[in-house]
Image (cartoon, rainbow, N blue to C red):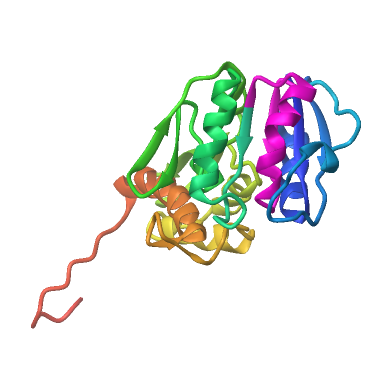
Amino acid sequence: MRILAIISGEYGQRHVNNIRANGPKEWAIEVWRAPAFMPPVIDDPRDFLPSELPPADLILSFAEHPGVAELLPEIVKMTGAKAVLVAVDNEKWLPPGLARQLREWLGEMGVTCVTPKPLCSLAPDHYLVGRRQKVEYSDPYLAEFTRYFGRPELRVEVDPGTRTVKSVEVLRDAVCGCARYVAQNLVGISADDAEEKAGLLHHHYPCLASMDKDPAYGDTLMHVSGNIIKEQVGEQVKPYRRIQYIIPGVKAE
């Protein structure tokens, strides 16, 4: 699969580094760094694009400026891409209205466009844009990408004797590499503490999703992202957790 990643800073570069390090070696990944500054209204996208871009099947937009969204239809024409993923880890990078408009623009061109908010909500057939707001999609290129990256999926093995995490297999990593980091640092942690530890590791990686309160969630995207991986771990260690009950007026042994 041919991939063109669009970046504008360290956020996007870290995603590209993780994809290159842990994705299939047969993926051909090219990178285009978008202009750091663009005007609020873009009259002609070609003024901000290079004379040519490499052919691509899938475009990954990790840009940190809404103006890049207005360039994407022209980028699709230049590359021949059939699918576009635009990461929304900060609503300022792609406001909801522009995200809907972009999906419509590209849909009219016969191109699948997904705008997961946060990025790690991207599953093989759907993604989130808000609390209980799920968008379904179907696309072979995005299906191939989400075999390896997207909504984190871990397989946690707990030692029933010691009730500690014995191993963690990464079935699907977050695009940024956070899930792999969490998995590597959960081994040896008590089942009682594993879910909370996963959340702390997620923050310490660190997660680069916004800490501004997102209107569609009523929470920060960093917390939404953290809860995704906490739930992954929490469900699997739940049978091994020791639950303490407090009875008023009774002294604990």
Across and down, in percent, residue 110 comes to 58, 17
The residue drawn where x is 77% and y is 31% is 4
Q: Nearer the viewer, residue 189 or 227?
A: 227
The residue drawn where x is 43% and y is 41% is 128
The residue drawn where x is 40% and y is 51% is 163
Apparent side of residue 39 relative to residue 163 in the rendered image (left or right): right
Q: Nearer the viewer, residue 63 or 188?
A: 63
Residue 62 part of the magenta-drawn span: yes
Residue 164 part of the magenta-drawn span: no
Apparent side of residue 78 relative to residue 113 in the rendered image (left or right): right
Across and down, in percent, residue 151 comes to 51, 39
The quadrant the C terminus occupies is bottom left
The quadrant the N terminus occupies is top right
The residue drawn where x is 43% and y is 54% is 227
Across and down, in percent, residue 233 comes to 43, 47
Q: Which residues are magenta?
A: 56-83
Q: Is residue 27 visible?
A: no
